Image (cartoon, rainbow, N blue to C red):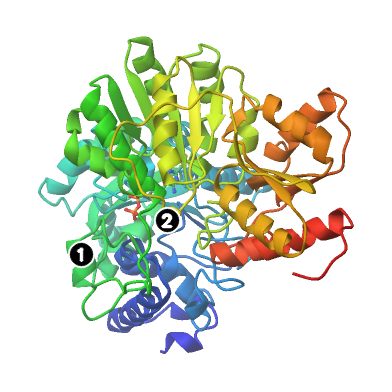
Amino acid sequence: MHLGDLTHPNELHGLKLSELEDVARQIRDRHLQVVSTSGGHLGPGLGVVELTLALYQTLDLDRDRVIWDVGHQAYPHKLITGRFNDFHTLRQQNGVAGYLKRSESNFDHFGAGHASTSISAALGMAMARDNRGEDFKCVAVIGDGALTGGMALEAINHAGHLPETPLLVVLNDNDMSISPPVGALSNVLNRARLSPPMQFLSGSVEESVRHLPFMGGELPAELNRLKGSMRRLAVPKVGAVFEELGFTYMGPIDGHDIGEMMRTFQAAHRDGGPVLVHVVTKKGKGYPYAEADQVGYHAQSAFDLTTGKAIPSKKPKPASYSKVFGQTLVKLCEQNSRVVGITAAMATGTGLDLLQKAVPNQYVDVGIAEQHAVTLAAGMACEGLRPVVAIYSTFLQRAYDQLIHDVGIQNLPVTFVLDRAGIVGADGPTHQGQYDISYMRSIPNFTVMAPKDEAELQRMLVTCLNHDGPTALRIPRGSGVGMPLMEEGWEALPIGRGELLREGDDLLIVAYGSMVHPALDTATLLEEAGLSTTVINARFLRPLDQALIHPLARRIRRVVTMEEGALAGGFGAAVLESLSDQDISIPLLRIGIPDKMVDHATPQQSKESLEMIPVQMAERIRRRFDLGGRDF
Ligand code: TPP
């Protein structure tokens, strides 16, 4: 069977083990070939090839629902559910998405991108099923990293309390989050993995009783009870934890042995309540470089398949904002032992891995637990520490109440560094840093800012740490603009003061953060067309520098705001409201992300589709203010 010819995953039913192993090989080959060319998640998908095949052998994919947590490991699922031939378009504009999407396929039962949602969604479906009197299966597949997220534990707490609601949770335990997992739960899983294999567990208990001649395949009630006690005796500690929480626990089993998994999943489906099957897999399985460096190959840009080495970009790029932040924080931590960096399972992504190496006792990784990270920091601040919480803009959405309730109301000196703020590109709508300007803008007591370049980022970090109250700064994904970094001697910025970068009489542009340089480029284009422009680097979203903006707006009488974030409740809205509050009524154009979700594409393509690149912005300005002149 060639996977390119597969039209429905049920067509795999009935294949022999050796044939399934061949399918596994085809999945791996295509996965590796595409990710090495266009980039994407590598290790997570390679680890679940057999798991996916074994599970799908035991399901009717026309009826049963499988919910993959995060969705970054679901490439094998995509490859057997109709996307094999288009897979080369992975994460490209209008191509196959990097995560699951209900709009992409009928087999994608629930979209995701953020961790720890699968058990809640699967339980919701199971409850709806029971409500309608139907009997399809609901399966959540969740990693050991995602299992540590609060939502997953909330869902387990709920599901375990519903003994008559069939639900299968497959724990894909590869002993890795993006980085090594942290926490007590992970220690318990470790012990289970290392304990001698207890293969007879419930799957095998079922097997043995099924062979008794008088059973006819069905277990009488008494034997069922006996099975329960045998299982409880046999389960390792982690199983006992789940059993106590109301789940039937099966495992740990070998996540690369298709036959063993099929037998266990079949047994799990026969149970009438919540079941957890503990599957042990190897992240990166089948590609030696990925098996050896599981952090590095979690996700990859294009690389050479034979050497495993990243293909270098054509021109050297300046360091990323995340790296500059990490380096600067290391210095600040070395100078002040009260400063602590906190990450929620994103050490490498946020640049905090540098702090972990350099000053490990001022570094904390809480796991995928953004809400906890924020309130933990609040507690630390109460006791005199100066926590710096580095979380992607998109993941901090999880902790909005904690920002308000634990930090804002108590006016605590916690600093938030919102990474990947703005357009992120190939990860698509679940990961766009699109909302933070709006959500940070309305929390009293917070001082909120964004740097125009990496040197200003350094000064802003110092500004935050000098300020006796909650602060937040947002930084974009990817490289800085190439501004030379200051080694030390950073001075704090005056709070609430913007920076006048360029003066002209025809137009006033007020830009925020990553849009300051594009604003300057736009002004240059306008200059070439005979229009002279004033450009302000706002620096602060709150407090807004009204003393700088208002008189210039009154005089110039044409205002443009630029931000890399949602226009609704955004930076432009803040400028507009402040002008209106002072009865300054003048034409204003707000440039930013309109009221829509931004799909996966390159950042440049997304910005183009939103008309946010300088030549397009110059044109929009000309049209909005009826400025005449030539096209840009
Ligand atoms: N925080 C949230 C709320 N969602 C996320 N997607 C992330 C952080 C970033 N993230 C994506 S995958 C991942 C993290 C932290 C690790 C997940 O680990 P695990 O569930 O064990 O899956 P694995 O990659 O090991 O297969």
Disc ID at residue 269: none
**Could you classify mark 2 by the number of other residues whose Cα lies within 10 Å: few (under 14), some (14-19), or many (20 or more)?**
some
Residue at screen point 35% across, 54% down: 319
Which SS class for mark 1?
Answer: helix
Mark 1 or mark 2, which has the lower sequence index?
1
Seen from the viewer's position, the closer of residues 414 and 519 is 519
The answer to whether residue 361 of the structure is visible from this angle is: yes
Seen from the viewer's position, the closer of residues 153 and 483 is 483
Q: Nearer the viewer, mark 1 or mark 2?
A: 2
Disc ID at residue 479: 2
Q: Marks 1 and 2, Cα distance to the nearest angstrom?
A: 28 Å
Q: Residue 398 appears at what percent x and percent y?
A: 52, 35
Residue 341: quarter of image: top left
- Amino acid at dot 2: Ser
Which SS class for mark 2?
Answer: loop
Residue 429: quarter of image: bottom right
Answer left or right for 608 relative to 589. Answer: left
- The residue furthest left is 196
Q: Residue 515 appears at what percent x and percent y?
A: 60, 49
* Residue pointed to by mark 1: 291
Seen from the viewer's position, the closer of residues 234 and 504 is 504
Q: Does ligand 1 reach within 8 Å of label 2's beta carbon? A: no
Residue at screen point 18% across, 71% down: 288
Residue 492 against residue 239 in the figure, above or below: above
Residue 410 against residue 432 in the figure, above or below: above
Residue at screen point 12% across, 45% down: 195
- Amino acid at dot 1: Glu
